[in-house]
Image (tube, rainbow, N blue to C red):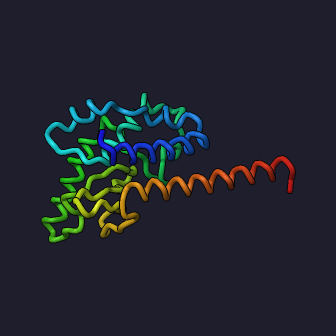
């Protein structure tokens, strides 16, 4: 893993730690990281962006999704969860088919360099661009034009970390209020 992937992985681990603190068992539910060798083996036919290496070195495959895991519990962004490692190639292929279908209708806003990493049950994605000078994060909602959420994955992880940090403070205040009534 190169220095850029290590830096992203470190930020993601920091984010996952605060999520785990708020939802004990989250890390186990999303699966622990995959070895770099396994990541490279899975994508042997394709160059692997640092972003995918960073994500899948921190998360992996859920042990199993049982009824013990609440529906909303796996979300890292409301209604969106990381695509499990065991499904990422299938999701990338489906995403490419969706892009090609849109191109057939002269709708070229899903770019060939976009790779999904978060997905919801409705088939919406968060993707990152893989151009040398554009690593921006985009939200793709149904058949609407994607919009840029952050300039890169590092900023995206920072934004989520701050969101969870504020949520943690709010939860602590609510706990204090529940105990003291003030």
Q: Which corner quadrant of the image does residue 84 belong to?
A: top left
Residue at left offset 43%, top offset 57%: 156
Relative side of 96 to 152, left or right: left
Residue 151: give x, y in percent of width and height: 37, 64
Residue 40 located left or right of residue 69 = left
Rendered residue at 50%/55% (across/down): 160
Instruction: Measuring from the top left, give residue 149's x and y in whole percent.
Output: 40, 65
Q: Residue at x 32, y 30 (%)?
A: 35
Residue at point 48%, 49% (across, down): 76
Residue 71 visible somewhere in the drawing: no
Q: Is residue 165 left or right of residue 135?
A: right
Q: Nearer the viewer, residue 182 or 17?
A: 17
* Quadrant location of the N terminus in the rendered image: top left
Q: Check the picture and name the quadrant holding the C terminus.
A: bottom right
Specify whether 175 is left or right of 90. Answer: right
Rendered view: 138 above or below 80: below
Q: What x and y, as percent, mark residue 103? A: 15, 65
Residue situated in front as seen by the camera: 136 or 124: 136
């Amino acid at each position: 893993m190169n220095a850029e992937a290590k830096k992203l992985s470190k930020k993601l681990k920091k984010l996952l730690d605060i999520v785990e603190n708020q939802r004990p068992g989250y890390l186990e539910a999303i699966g622990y990281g995959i070895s770099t060798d396994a990541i490279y083996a899975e994508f042997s036919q394709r160059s692997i962006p640092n972003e995918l290496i960073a994500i899948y070195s921190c998360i992996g495959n859920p042990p199993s999704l049982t009824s013990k895991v609440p529906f909303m519990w796996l979300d890292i962004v409301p209604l969106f969860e990381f695509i499990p490692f065991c499904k990422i190639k299938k999701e990338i292929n489906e995403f490419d088919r969706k892009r090609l279908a849109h191109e057939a209708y002269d709708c070229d806003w899903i770019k060939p360099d976009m790779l999904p990493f978060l997905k919801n049950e409705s088939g919406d994605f968060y993707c990152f661009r893989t151009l040398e000078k554009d690593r921006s994060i985009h939200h793709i909602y149904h058949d609407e034009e994607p919009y840029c959420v952050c300039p890169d994955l590092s900023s995206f992880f920072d934004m989520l970390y701050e969101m969870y940090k504020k949520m943690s403070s709010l939860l602590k205040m609510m706990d204090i209020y529940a105990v003291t009534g003030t």
